[in-house]
């Protein structure tokens, strides 16, 4: 067996008929050194994997904290206008009091402004005439197909976030 292993390293066995005899003690010492080196490498890999997992866990905690902090900030900014809107709904639906539409619009604009500060993107202005782009526009009627670059009127604004279309703008052909 020792001769077979030694032949793999170019000494003894069939591969080298004229090689000097193998010093068994030297060979065993070198083999143990290689085994120790391999064990050290495996330990290092194990430690590096643990470090990587710890780094990933710490990074995830930081990401979660940042997201929660940003979400809490957004909710804090939305708290007043949402509260006002709920009060207006209560006054109108429960008490039967007329609510000034301008007041509802003001609260709605405030909600949109706050959401825009946190990444909401309004795509298209209601009443605006634009060239139809199926990536950003959705025809409101299925009865009539709209061709790309055809002039259309935006009836419902589109919504985007992080440069992605969340809701396409609802559009109609100009002649409708």
Image (cartoon, grey):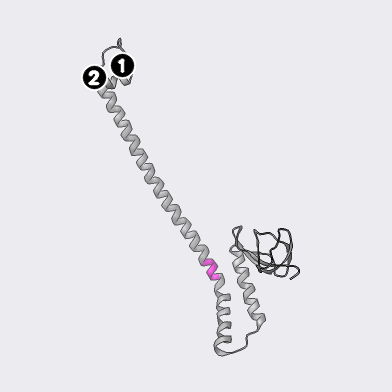
User: Could you tell me how far apart the alpha carbons at marks 2 and 1 are, in whole angstroms?
Assistant: 12 Å
Q: Residue furthest front?
A: 143
Q: Residues within 10 Å of mark 2 (few under 14, many from 20)?
A: few
Tell whether 63 sits left or right of 53.
Answer: right
Q: Nearer the viewer, mark 2 or mark 1?
A: 1
Q: Residue furthest right?
A: 175
Residue occupied by mark 1: 11
Dot placed on the residue nearer the N-terminal end, 2 or 1:
1
The x, y position of residue 100, in whole percent, is 65, 84
Q: Who is closer to the viewer here, 148 or 13?
A: 148
- The magenta stretch is 72-76
Confirm whether the magenta stretch covers residue 159.
Answer: no
Q: Who is closer to the viewer here, 155 or 72?
A: 155
The residue under the point 23% across, 19% down is 24
Question: Is 172 situated above or below 163?
Answer: below
Q: Quadrant of residue 5?
A: top left
Residue occupied by mark 2: 24
The x, y position of residue 145, in whole percent, is 68, 63
The residue under the point 26% across, 13% down is 21
Q: Quadrant of the C terminus?
A: bottom right
For mark 2, give the secondary structure. Answer: helix
Question: Is 102 situated above or below 21?
Answer: below
Q: Can you see residue 120? A: no
């Amino acid at each position: 067996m020792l001769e077979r292993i030694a032949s793999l390293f170019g000494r003894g066995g069939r591969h080298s008929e004229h090689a000097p005899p193998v010093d068994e003690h030297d060979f065993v010492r070198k083999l143990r050194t290689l085994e120790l080196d391999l064990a050290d490498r495996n330990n290092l890999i194990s430690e590096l994997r643990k470090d990587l997992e710890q780094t990933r866990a710490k990074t995830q905690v930081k990401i979660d904290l940042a997201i929660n902090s940003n979400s809490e900030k957004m909710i804090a900014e939305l708290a007043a206008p949402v509260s006002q809107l709920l009060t207006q709904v209560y006054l109108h639906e429960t008490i039967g009091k007329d609510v000034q539409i301008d007041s509802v619009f003001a609260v709605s604009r405030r909600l949109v402004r706050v959401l825009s500060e946190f990444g909401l993107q309004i795509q298209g202005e209601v009443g605006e005439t634009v060239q139809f782009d199926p990536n950003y526009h959705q025809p409101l009627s299925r009865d009539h197909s709209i061709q790309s670059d055809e002039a259309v009127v935006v009836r419902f604004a589109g919504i985007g976030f992080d440069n992605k279309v969340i809701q396409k703008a609802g559009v109609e052909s100009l002649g409708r």
